[in-house]
Image: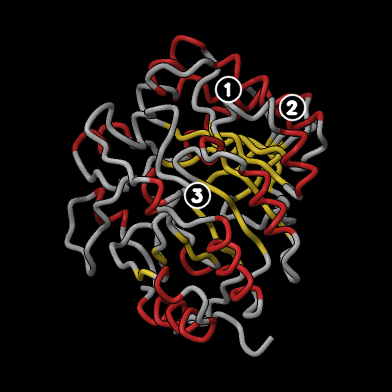
Amino acid sequence: MTQLLVDRFGRVHDYLRISVTDRCNLRCVYCMPEEGMEFEPDEKLLTFDEIASVVRVLAGYGVRKLRLTGGEPLVRKNLEVLVGMLSAIPGIEDIALTTNAIYFASRAEKLREAGLTRINVSLDSLRPDRFSLITRGGELARVLQGLEAAYRVGLDPVKLNVVLMKGMNDDEIGDFLAMTLERNIHVRFIEYMPIGHEDEGWRARYLPLQTVLERCTERGWKVESLEKPISGNGPSQNYRIAGAAGTFGLIHPVSDHFCQTCNRLRLTADGNIKPCLYWSDEFNVRRYIGDDGALAAMFFRALEVKPESHEMAQALMKQSQSHTPTARRMSQIGG
């Protein structure tokens, strides 16, 4: 290893989030509009060989952790083939998947055998009718089957990602927390972010995560702060209800951003590096694949322009910002 991927603020980047598609089988209200999305044709998406080529180069600069995202990554055919290719790259220690789990139950075994180590399941309601409303047609039972499959094949830890939205699912906070009492699951509550739609609808639904701790107090649960991070070293502040088998975490990019410890870069399905999820800066690397030196140089160039922080809190307050926010929706970036 010649050098690490370090930006001008001294942050070491050892984590790459890879979007394998901008398509999804759901239309979650915070992720993409119900209609009008234009998806990339297959020929514009990075091939598995191209993705593996990028990862091989970055592994030589200290990248150790990968996460496959979308859209919904499981709409990409033969994803286990890519997982196998990536797990065979020297230096790669961890391959995670963020999924809505609709298609996961039937593919869990193959993905695990190929080298998948962890899974995050996006699940914003435990009520079938409300889940269908938020996802615009999703079937909760299939997600729960996918969740059970993750346990069955031995993925650890299993995490739930819950985007909290005021007036939409905040009355289910206690129900999600109760899941941790009997089962070794990590429920992560995430603030609603203005990715690609910084509008009044977002501001009206935004809810600071202090609400979660208030719900614990209301139910008489004693909460313990965890010093040791949950596997994966994500940005959540982690807690356990006293005596619970599982844990919960708070991810608050708006009210209390964690940019000072950011260790991640993003590779979009169409071959662009995004140094920051929120800002519009992108660097296309597809044309450099096959030239390892030029490819690495583009990643270092992206790090040179990575800002010290995003400014979502300013967006909430309608204050001026130092950079241009992205116009891409979350599904087009790979959250």
**Which residue lies at the image location 28% right of the left edge and 62% below the top edge?**
280
x and y, in percent, of residue 180 in the image: 71, 29
The N terminus: image quadrant: bottom right
Q: Nearer the viewer, residue 54 or 15?
A: 54
The residue type indicated by label 3 comes to: Val
Earlier-in-chain disc, 2 versus 1: 2
* Mark in the foreground, 3 or 1: 3
Question: What is the secondary structure assignment of the residue under circle 3?
Answer: loop
x and y, in percent, of residue 87 in the image: 73, 58
- Seen in the picture, residue 59 relative to 69 is either above or below; the reply is below
Q: Mark 3 points at which residue?
A: 20
Q: Name the residue under label 2.
A: 149
The numbered disc on residue 229 is: none
The residue type indicated by label 1 comes to: Gly
Q: Mark 1 points at which residue?
A: 174
**Which residue lies at the image location 67% right of the left edge and 44% below the top edge?**
80
